[in-house]
Image (spheres, rainbow, N blue to C red):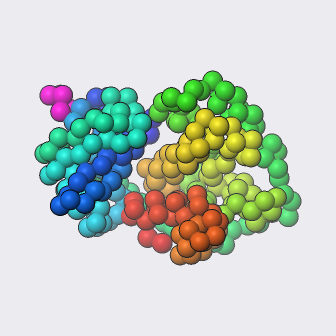
């Protein structure tokens, strides 16, 4: 369970993270993923958003949250716990914004090793495979948390590294992170395939959970690849989709790139 959920759990019950809500404003359908949602003492739904930006939330994000509180909405997708798809978010739902510390972002350089280390020389990916075999297609947040733990490496470092995967290359992000002792996300080929068999979207959910945890801990980030071209490459050439999503998540939470 991440730090934000622990804090929110002190004032709310049955807390869940990363719930997607659909709302209609002036005839236009919009979707927003909220950071944490739970019930207050009176049994009313309550939402918490957090930001690491010094000036608070971006105006666009703030407007979406205000519309959600004003108009209400409906949870979409499978949802989690008591917040399954179809649950209504009433008009006037309370949304609190909590500010947290942000770290720094550096775009390279980092030490590159002369020796490529295969996955099993860095960690045991069979642990990931074995855990997925205990899961069903109706997995829980507990499953996501466990997979996040298994795919997070060098977790005690104050610096996390993000970048592109390059097949059997010493300049691939996971090789550079390992060489420098930085925190990084990696499931290995076998682990990624095993997670995908449970749900094709699950690896990306676990990746998001990994990054949110590093953000919540206020870590500094090192980027090994140009973040400004990330979305274009992901959309046009299908290169580095995870990296593009990570950059957008950093930006959303106030990291200046």
For the point 85% across and 64% down, which residue is it? 114
* Residue 154 makes an appearance in the image: no
Q: Which residues are magenta?
A: 40-44
Q: Kindly indicate the quadrant of the structure image that contains residue 74.
A: top left
Horizontally, residue 26 falls left or right of residue 133, namely: left
For the point 28% across and 29% down, which residue is it? 13
Looking at the image, is 159 positioned above or below residue 133?
below
Q: Nearer the viewer, residue 143 or 9?
A: 143
Q: Nearer the viewer, residue 216 or 94?
A: 94
- Measured as percent of width and height from the top left, residue 120 is found at 80, 42
Which quadrant would the N terminus be assigned to in this image? top left
For the point 58% across and 58% down, which residue is it? 242
Q: How many tags in the picture?
A: 0
* Residue 1 makes an appearance in the image: yes
Q: Nearer the viewer, residue 120 or 242?
A: 242
Horizontally, residue 7 falls left or right of residue 199, namely: left
Looking at the image, is 78 positioned above or below residue 226?
above
- Measured as percent of width and height from the top left, residue 182 is found at 64, 55
- Measured as percent of width and height from the top left, residue 59 is found at 26, 67
Please identify the dominant SS of the magenta region: loop
Q: Kindly indicate the quadrant of the structure image that contains residue 255.
A: bottom left
């Amino acid at each position: 369970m991440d730090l934000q959920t622990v804090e929110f759990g002190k004032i709310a019950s049955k807390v869940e993270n990363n719930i997607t809500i659909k709302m209609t404003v002036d005839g236009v359908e919009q979707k927003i993923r909220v950071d944490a949602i739970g019930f207050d003492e009176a049994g009313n739904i309550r939402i918490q958003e957090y930001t690491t930006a010094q000036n608070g939330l971006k105006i666009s994000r703030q407007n979406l949250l205000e519309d959600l509180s004003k108009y209400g909405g409906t949870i979409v997708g499978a949802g989690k716990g008591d917040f399954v798809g179809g649950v209504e978010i009433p008009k006037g739902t309370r949304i609190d914004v909590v500010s947290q510390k942000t770290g720094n972002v550096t775009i390279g350089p980092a030490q590159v090793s002369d020796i490529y280390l295969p996955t099993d020389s860095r960690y045991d990916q069979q642990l990931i495979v074995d855990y997925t075999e205990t899961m069903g297609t109706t997995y829980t947040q507990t499953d996501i948390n466990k997979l996040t733990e298994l795919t997070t490496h060098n977790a005690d470092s104050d610096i996390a590294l993000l970048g592109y995967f390059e097949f059997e290359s010493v300049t691939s992000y996971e090789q550079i992170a390992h060489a420098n002792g930085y925190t990084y996300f990696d499931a290995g080929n076998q682990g990624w395939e095993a997670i995908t068999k449970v749900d094709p979207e699950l690896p990306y959910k676990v990746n998001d959970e990994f990054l949110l945890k590093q953000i919540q801990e206020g870590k500094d980030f090192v980027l090994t690849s140009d973040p400004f071209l990330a979305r274009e490459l992901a959309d046009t050439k299908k290169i580095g989709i995870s990296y593009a999503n990570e950059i957008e998540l950093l930006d959303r939470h106030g990291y200046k790139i």
